[in-house]
Amino acid sequence: MATKKATKKPTKTGFVLGVPRDLPAAKVVEKGKAVGITLTAQQIYKIRSQANARKVSKAAKPAAKGKRKAGKLSASDFIRKYPSKSANDIVELGKKQGLRFTISSVYQCRSYDKKRKGGSKKAPGRKAKDVKFQVFSGGGGGSESDLKKAALAVGFPRAREVVEELERGYMALLG
């Protein structure tokens, strides 16, 4: 006489995923009881949502960069091919290639690329004054304070060198 193999009881997840997805949770609970599996509606919802999330993550794998499924370039990659052309020209060329995008898409793509490259990292506003040794107009009370600010900006050792050079030049002129 042939021996019968013991049939394994399916797991809860296997059972839920084995029944049609459109079957209401209450019906799945009833079918589970008939097979000997105790389930709640909440467990069924959770199993189905996790299985759906796995399907979505597998389907959402990105294609090769800049490629569509049919092998065409994406609109943004097409725009990047022509960095010096005007937006109107790019839109017209895109139409000939079968791509549909607007002029504002061109500007938006270029703006995004500029931000990603790093662009200008300086804060907007007035440019900081570059304090260098300058010839000061004589007589005014501000001349000395300007000289002091310049000495602080370049450092005292360099300020002394500059003043000594100026003094040597002045003495050479006087003879």
Image: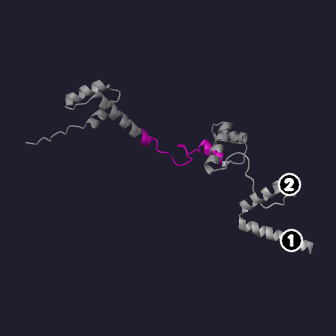
**Is label 1 in a helix, a strand or a loop?**
helix
Q: Is residue 122 above or below residue 9?
A: below
Q: CA distance from mark 2 to mark 1?
A: 23 Å
Q: Residue at x 83, y 54 (%)?
A: 141
Residue 59 sits inside the magenta stretch = yes
Q: Are marks 2 and 1 in contact (CB under 8 Å)?
A: no
Q: Is residue 147 above or below residue 172?
A: above
Going by the image, does 147 lie left or right of 124?
Answer: right
Residue 36 sits inside the magenta stretch = no
Residue nearest the observer in this picture, 83 or 164: 164
Mark 2 Cα-neighbour bin, 10 Å: few <14, some 14–19, many ≥20: few
Magenta part mainly helix, strand or loop?
Answer: loop
What's under tag 1, amino acid-wise? Gly
What's under tag 2, amino acid-wise? Gly
Identify residue for label 2: 140
Identify residue for label 1: 169
Q: Residue at x 26, y 35 (%)?
A: 12
The answer to which image quadrant residue 43 occupies is: top left
Q: Residue at x 69, y 42 (%)?
A: 90
Q: How far from the left and from the top, in percent, is residue 68?
A: 55, 43
